[in-house]
Amino acid sequence: MFAVNFTSPERLWWALVLVIPLAIHLWRRRYQRVVAWSAMRFLQAAQQQVQQRVRLRRLWLLLLRVAMLGLLIFAIADPSTDYSQFSQYLRGSTGTHHVLLLDTSYSMGAVGESASAFELARQKAIKYVQQLPQGDVISIVTISSRDRPLIEQPVFDRQEIIAELAALKLTNRSGEALNAITLAAELAERSRAAMQDIVMTRYAIFSDFQRDSWHGVTPEKVSRIIGASGKIEYFDCRQPYLHNLAVEDLDVEYPAGPFGNQVALRAQIKNYSPTKSQSVTVTWSIEGRVVQREQVALAPSELVTVRLDDQNLKLGQQQAKVQIASIPAAQSDSLLSDNTRWVVFSTAAKFQVLTVTGRYRSEELLVTALVPTASTRWPVQITTINEGELIDQGLTQYDMIALCNVKQISAAELDQLHAYVTAGGTLFLCPGDRIDIDNYNRSFAPSSKFRLPLQWQQVVEDSDVQIQLDKTSHAITKLFADNPANGIEATPISTYIKCVASETDSVQPILVLNNGDPLYLLGAVGSGHVFILTTSIDPSQKTGKWSDLGSWPSFLPLVHESLAHVARLGGHNQNHTTGSTLFEQIDLSRSLDDLQIQVRTPSGQQKPISVVHPRDSQQSESQPLVWSFSETEALGVYSIMTFVDGVPVASNSHAINLDGQDSHDLSIPAEDLFNAESLISDHSFTVNEMPSDDRYDWFAALLSLVLALGVVELWVYRNRVPLEPDSGGQR
């Protein structure tokens, strides 16, 4: 009924010092040898009486001193008692299942004048639990991206719930309130079915009610989800973002093209304060080494782009970080978790291309664009095979595969290409006079495995068509749009395959003819990409050239800009948000029994990866396999190491960042979410208000009692009885 809680229970170990007075008392006891002396016989009776009184007073002194020390240690542990539990005990259970929905999204880390929104929510949740009647059961669901409750089975024990709340930590994710409410309602339904004593469910919500986390939540939806047996109690824990600064984005550019070693980093920094100008120090780091610091001033609500230009880096994979800090350092940033971002990118160490030819020399102009120099230091390496040899190739070693005037694609080759592209590869389709249009439709149309929303139709001969740049605004053609005299619009084109495509996120036109027909498209399939030309660049066609695109001066920069765009998009395969699942294709040239794959997390912890599964469950067993890793809650860089018989043979990295949705303070009034009277509990507390505090702090009372015992001890000591009459009053 009266639970005693300690703010610092670890200090109770100090009670071991209580053995010190007892040890001193035992050590000071005097054991004297009795010597018979006739003259003392007449004093024995009086002496025995005095000794008994002395022993009694010494015992009192011992007890008083031990009590003083014990109470002092008890007071230092800061005990308190909640008397409301007595009334709860008398009331007994109300047959209610309390589901606590606690917001753990990173916006709850916003710090106000004293504590963060999350600490405020935790305190209110603990107080809520302490006020509940005995016999009611409790569960906890977090408003984050969890797919299961924190406490699945309803719990009677208040201390267990309080311990879980005390151990709960913020996540680096945005909240998903609608999913959390649905999860809580499903939990409540299962609990009512399993526990017949539950007659109603009360959902206690502790949140800052940020718009991104609560997007899509309406009173009608909540009422439909929780049903008639559920009621809502909400606690607004928001802390205004007084002076929040955030790194909005970090991206990589390739000024020298996708095959150079020069990169430029670009970051966007936002001042979310609507009234206050702020200054920050921007620190750039590459591979853990600080390469530049600069100071940037931001006006209220201003978004500023800062750059780290033209870094000559070693070839291979790199990782970079940008971090901001307020100036002066004493000025507090309301939300610190969005002040740092990481990016993983690559400079081409070796770019492997497989060209599949349908006719001799059909790949010639594409190869010239990919390898425009005879220098042995050029990173692009070309392997050329005939169309019948594709099925025998292992594709995982290639960065790009180009099909040049290949007549048709078999079902086995289609499975092979689909697995390659889905895992992150790039496919380049260069048609010609040999291709079977019906076969290509079966291979790449919406009904195929590639599921691209396009339809190949008939061959069109029209010498009046020409490229028109202003019909599209794709990032690949920005170089040509910025240089009007580039000449790409003057490229002679006389024949092409009419292709009808639905412009969606999965297929985007890059170049379009003046009659509206697409000439060059980019499709997205899984983690990879498919480039599609609708005209031929094969100079060896028997029917004559369809166009001069392959030999036109603009073709080389077009190919390089296309690959640079893919390189930037490919960076998204290595740069993710918290909670994303990391995966990579496994090189099957080695036995799986000899492979060991480990992840080093941002904290330096090594974790083995044991999950190996097909990227697509419909693939056959002969298709490529991938590993996956889903424990990506921490921000930073995850390093993947592949070992064969304990020897490292490959490494790769992935960056995990915030999604940035909660960096701006856009909260929703809680009343707008739960304004239906049927939702609000009759016992709901008002916003930011808690029930009266019935907790009694014993610290001052215990110190007063120690002082009183000290006075009693002093009085007992001063009125002690001497052991011998002639001791002169000395102890």
Image (cartoon, rainbow, N blue to C red):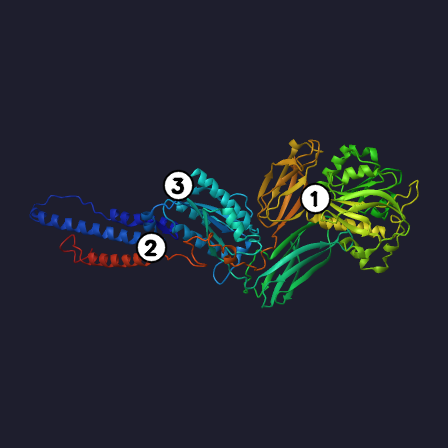
Q: Position of residue 473 (x, y in %)?
A: 77, 56
Q: Is residue 634 above or below residue 244?
A: above
Left or right: 683 as drawn, with respect to 64: right
Disc 2 versus disc 1: nearer the observer = 1
Q: Can the viewer see residue 147?
A: yes
Amino acid type, callout 1: Ser
Amino acid type, callout 2: Ala
Tag 1 or tag 2, which sits nearer the N-term? 2
Q: Can the viewer see residue 347?
A: no
Q: Which image quarter is the C terminus in? A: bottom left
Q: Which mark is residue 75?
A: 2
Left or right: 372 as drawn, with respect to 604: right
Q: Residues within 10 Å of mark 3 (few under 14, many from 20)?
A: some
Q: Regarding mark 3 in the picture, which secondary structure is present there?
A: loop
Q: Quadrant of residue 291?
A: bottom right
Marks 3 and 1 sit apart, C-alpha to C-alpha, by 51 Å
Q: Tell me if label 3 and label 1 are in contact, CB under 8 Å.
A: no
Which residue was labeled with disc 1? 527
Q: Regarding mark 1 in the picture, which secondary structure is present there?
A: loop
Marks 2 and 1 sit apart, C-alpha to C-alpha, by 62 Å
Nearest the viewer among 375 and 516 is 516
Which residue was labeled with disc 3? 197
Left or right: 688 as drawn, with respect to 63: right
